[in-house]
């Protein structure tokens, strides 16, 4: 009888442990999957639903979706009559932004945050700090100083090194802006390129040493739109997602 009771007890213990292990395993899987649900897809390769052009309600045909990417092709007049920066329809404050970009030969573009569309600003560049996108080999900006090279906080913080892929290949960039911690950073192709303050005296001192010194609205908007720059060159973006902090 004792052997039977012992066997039953062992069996119940075994089943209990197995069930607990299964529940733990399922909980672990859930924990792994949960962070991905925090991301909001801003561009999935199929539509411009989350985007519009700066100070416009739509997206003009200079932006096209090609091979699951949004591609800017400069208009015949060079875009002299209108700025075609893309901006998100929604505004963001603290976030992690992830995207892939590909620049044309000798091309130039950028990613902004904190963009404000007040009528007194004619481009996203007037208010939004920029993370530079550039052909470091052939665009003259790369020779103007390291703060103008790909991955830089434009004209303020130089990238750690050049890790850009050859022209025609995709680069993956992650931009973090966290006002709660007064910190920002850029990772390009898995390498941290820059880190910087985003507010207060530290930020103001950095701006004062740049070309943006004295600009009325530059870097002043804690909450604003994400922008993709029209700099007159062919540029492509894909896999754009954002996680609010």
Image (cartoon, helix red, strand yellow):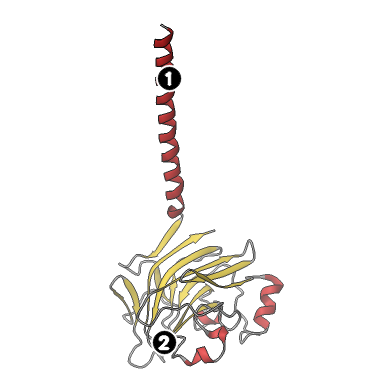
Q: Position of residue 31 (x, y in %)?
A: 46, 46
Q: Which mark is residue 149?
A: none
Q: Position of residue 212 (x, y in %)?
A: 61, 84
Q: In the figure, 181 relative to 226: above or below?
A: above
Quadrant where the image shows the N terminus:
top left
Instruction: Classify mark 1: helix, strand or loop.
Output: helix
Q: Position of residue 185 (x, y in %)?
A: 56, 69
Q: Is residue 15 left or right of residue 156?
A: left
Which circle's residue, 1 or 2, is located before the other in the chain? Answer: 1
Which residue extends farthest left? 67
Q: In the figure, 25 relative to 244: above or below?
A: above
Quarter of the view holding residue 223: bottom right
Answer whether labels 1 and 2 touch (C-beta < 8 Å). no
Instruction: Classify mark 2: helix, strand or loop.
Output: loop
In front: 185, or 53?
185
Quarter of the view holding residue 231: bottom left
Q: Which residue is mark 2?
A: 107
Quarter of the view holding residue 206: bottom right
Q: Foreground mark, 1 or 2?
A: 1
Q: Is residue 48 left or right of residue 16?
A: left
Q: Which mark is residue 10?
A: 1
Task: Give the Cα separation between the discs numbered 1 and 2.
Answer: 70 Å
Which residue extends farthest front? 3
In front: 137, or 74?
137
């Amino acid at each position: 009888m004792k052997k039977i009771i012992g066997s039953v007890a062992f069996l119940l213990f075994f089943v209990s442990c197995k069930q607990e292990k299964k529940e733990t395993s399922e909980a672990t899987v859930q924990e792994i999957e949960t962070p991905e649900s925090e991301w909001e897809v801003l561009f999935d390769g199929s539509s411009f639903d989350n985007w519009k052009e700066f100070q416009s309600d739509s997206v003009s045909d200079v932006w096209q979706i090609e091979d699951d990417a949004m591609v800017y092709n400069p208009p015949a007049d060079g875009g002299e009559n209108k700025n075609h920066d893309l901006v998100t329809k929604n505004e963001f404050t603290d976030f992690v932004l992830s995207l892939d970009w590909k620049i044309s030969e000798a091309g130039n573009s950028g990613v902004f945050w904190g963009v404000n569309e007040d009528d007194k600003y004619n481009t996203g560049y007037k208010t939004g700090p920029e993370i530079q996108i550039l052909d470091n080999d052939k665009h003259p900006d790369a020779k103007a100083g390291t703060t103008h090279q790909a991955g830089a906080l434009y004209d303020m913080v130089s990238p750690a090194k050049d890790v850009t892929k050859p022209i025609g290949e995709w680069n993956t960039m992650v931009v973090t802006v966290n006002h709660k911690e007064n910190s920002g950073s850029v990772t390009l192709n898995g390498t941290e390129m820059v880190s910087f303050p985003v507010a207060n005296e530290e930020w103001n001192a950095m701006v004062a040493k740049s070309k943006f010194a004295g600009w009325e609205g530059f870097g002043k908007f804690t909450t604003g739109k994400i922008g993709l720059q029209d700099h007159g060159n062919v540029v492509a973006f894909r896999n754009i997602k954002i996680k609010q902090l």
